[in-house]
Image: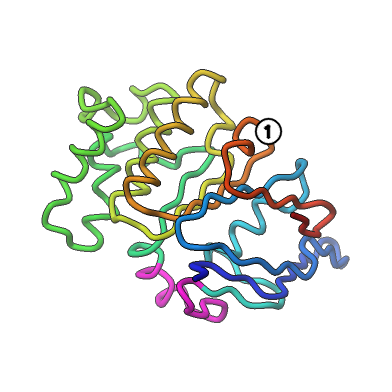
Amino acid sequence: MAILEAKNLNKTYTVDHRSIRVLNDISLQVATGEFVVIAGSSGSGKTTLLTLLSGLDHPSSGRVFIDQRDITGASEDELAPVRNRMIGFVFQSFYLVPSMTARENIMFPAELLGLPDAEERARHLLRRVGLLDRADNLPSQLSGGEKQRISLCRAVINDPKLLFADEPTGNLDSQNGRLVLAQLLELKAEKGATLILVTHNPEIAAAADRVLTLKDGHLTG
């Protein structure tokens, strides 16, 4: 059964009174537990597609279903609890809260849900990624690789069904990139989540169950 489905997605932006179509009639299905890579060159529309699939943006036309629920026309108030319960995000630029410690950044989504074991979950995840000794460090006191591992923990603390990752190793050197990818796949497996990952890295694409390629706004594969 598909955990994620897109039907005939189009996305058009208006720039200087000109309409620019970024995505053209995209349809896809992602099965529960699958690891799907969305690949393509810079500017091909990969991140735009990810934002539509995750509900961070709305398509110009077409529909998106998460766990058979149509989220296309949902308001921000309706989408917020869906994202927090069902979806985890990993971004290239980390987006950690600078005034919060590593542990507090991880705990934040669980506290929004009111989970009583938020701190216990955060400590378990910190231990899983080898950063328990960095629990009280601020993001400014962490390396890029450590920041991304903290963001992985934050993404999975609520046991999401869906993980979206946008170039999660893009700001890392090759060694840290491999470590982050390995830990992302381990946490995906541990949580039984479905992973949709945007990358132009062929090494990451080779690890996927399926690779979808975007070119000139059209999807192949």
Which residue does the numbered mark 1 point to in the structure image?
A: 202
Q: Secondary structure at mark 1?
A: helix
> Which image quadrant is residue 17 in?
bottom right
On screen, residue 109 versus residue 116, left or right, reads: right
Q: Residue 150 at x, y = what percent?
A: 35, 35
As shown in the figure, which amino acid type bears the numbered disc 1? Answer: Pro
Q: Residue 78 at x, y = what percent?
A: 41, 77
On screen, residue 189 versus residue 29, left or right, reads: left
On screen, residue 17 versus residue 127, left or right, reads: right
Name which residue lies at 33% across and 41% down: 153
Above or below 55: residue 183: above
Q: Which residues are magenta?
A: 66-82
Q: Residue 83 at x, y = what percent?
A: 41, 64
Q: Which quadrant would the C terminus be assigned to in this image?
A: bottom right
On screen, residue 178 versus residue 188, left or right, reads: right
Nearest the eye: 4 or 9: 4
